[in-house]
């Protein structure tokens, strides 16, 4: 399975898959930090250029967090939510650059991001309520009959633990599909382009792949934005659930 997803780069030192992914992750970090640096180095009351773009993106993301989590609590999660969005979005786009690979096309990377969200949700809830009270909310509120509480506890706990799986596989599957499609198109052009003057079918396949590639790149940009937005949106929903559980527990007491 791993070998079938291993596409060799035409850049010699990127031929090792494990090293490539780690390098892509650091490049992703560097690009995000660079964009934030140029967008905040000369802050002005009337933003323009990079500052305007960064502020626009931050405002939209934070407004979504406010609407989902609530303005009273959302500001505590701004660093996590913004970091996840920019890191995932830039990482998704990297696969569109020849010779580079999207770090988010690797399951171990998306799983790590999902586990961070899961642990952040649990740690935030435990810090607010304490571990006993936090675990109690899985059994439901005071209105739940006592015989049903153990069953509800395990159902809710399993549902909560499954969230990192859904987050990681959703992001991994969509970005890997984009990577495979682009790789197939490039391979078709490389294979059939030298024979277009001698074989009509080769010319048709090479030309079709050559024309289709820009459209796939545009689609890749949209997929990258949508997947980063979906991951961030679900993160906000999960964090909102932890906050809501804390409020319900506080009101019950």
Image: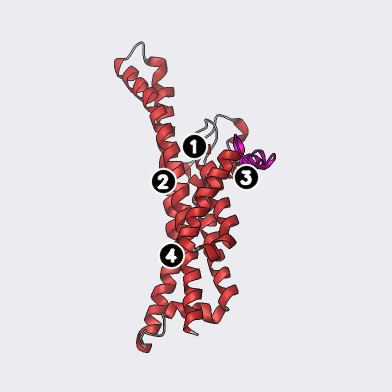
Secondary element under disc 4, as helix, strand or loop, is loop
From this view, report whether residue 139 is shown above or below residue 146: above
| Mark 3 or 2, nearer chain start | 3
Q: Residue at x 49, y 37 (%)?
A: 7
| Mark 4 or 2, nearer chain start | 4
Secondary element under disc 3, as helix, strand or loop, is helix
Report crowding for label 2: few under 14, some 14 to 19, many 20 or more residues within 10 A (C-alpha): some
Q: Calculate the distance from the C-alpha at mark 3 to the C-alpha at mark 1.
A: 22 Å
What residue is shown with label 1?
Answer: 7
User: Which x, y percent locates residue 164?
Assistant: 47, 61
Whether the residues at callouts 1 and 4 have beta carbons within 8 Å, the answer is no
Q: Which region of the structure is painted magenta? A: 31-50
In the picture, measured across the screen, residue 109 lies left or right of residue 159, that is right
What residue is shown with label 3?
Answer: 29
Q: Nearer the viewer, residue 234 or 185?
A: 234
Report crowding for label 4: few under 14, some 14 to 19, many 20 or more residues within 10 A (C-alpha): few
What residue is shown with label 4?
Answer: 162
- Which of discs 3 and 2 lies nearer the camera? The answer is 3
């Amino acid at each position: 399975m791993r070998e079938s997803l291993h596409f060799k780069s035409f850049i010699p030192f990127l031929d090792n898959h494990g090293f490539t992914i780690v390098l892509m992750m650091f490049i992703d970090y560097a690009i995000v930090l660079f964009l934030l640096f140029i967008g905040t180095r000369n802050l002005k009351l009337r933003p323009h250029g990079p500052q305007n773009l960064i502020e626009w993106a931050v405002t939209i993301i934070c407004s979504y967090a406010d609407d989902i989590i609530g303005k009273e609590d959302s500001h505590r999660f701004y660093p996590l939510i913004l970091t996840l969005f920019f890191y995932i979005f830039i990482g998704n786009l990297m696969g569109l650059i020849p010779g580079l690979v999207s770090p988010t096309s690797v399951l171990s990377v998306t799983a790590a991001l999902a586990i961070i969200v899961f642990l952040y949700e649990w740690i935030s809830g435990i810090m607010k309520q304490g571990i006993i009270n936090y675990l109690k909310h899985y059994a439901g509120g005071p209105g739940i009959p006592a015989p049903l509480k153990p069953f509800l506890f395990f159902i809710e706990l399993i549902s909560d633990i499954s969230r990192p799986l859904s987050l990681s596989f959703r992001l991994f599957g969509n970005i890997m599909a984009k990577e495979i499609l682009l790789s197939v198109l490039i391979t078709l052009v490389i294979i059939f382009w030298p024979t277009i003057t001698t074989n009509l079918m080769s010319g048709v396949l090479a030309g079709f792949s050559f024309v289709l590639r820009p459209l796939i790149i545009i689609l890749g940009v949209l997929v990258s934005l949508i997947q980063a937005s979906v991951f961030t949106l679900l993160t906000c929903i999960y964090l909102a659930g932890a906050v809501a559980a804390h409020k319900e527990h506080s009101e019950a007491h």
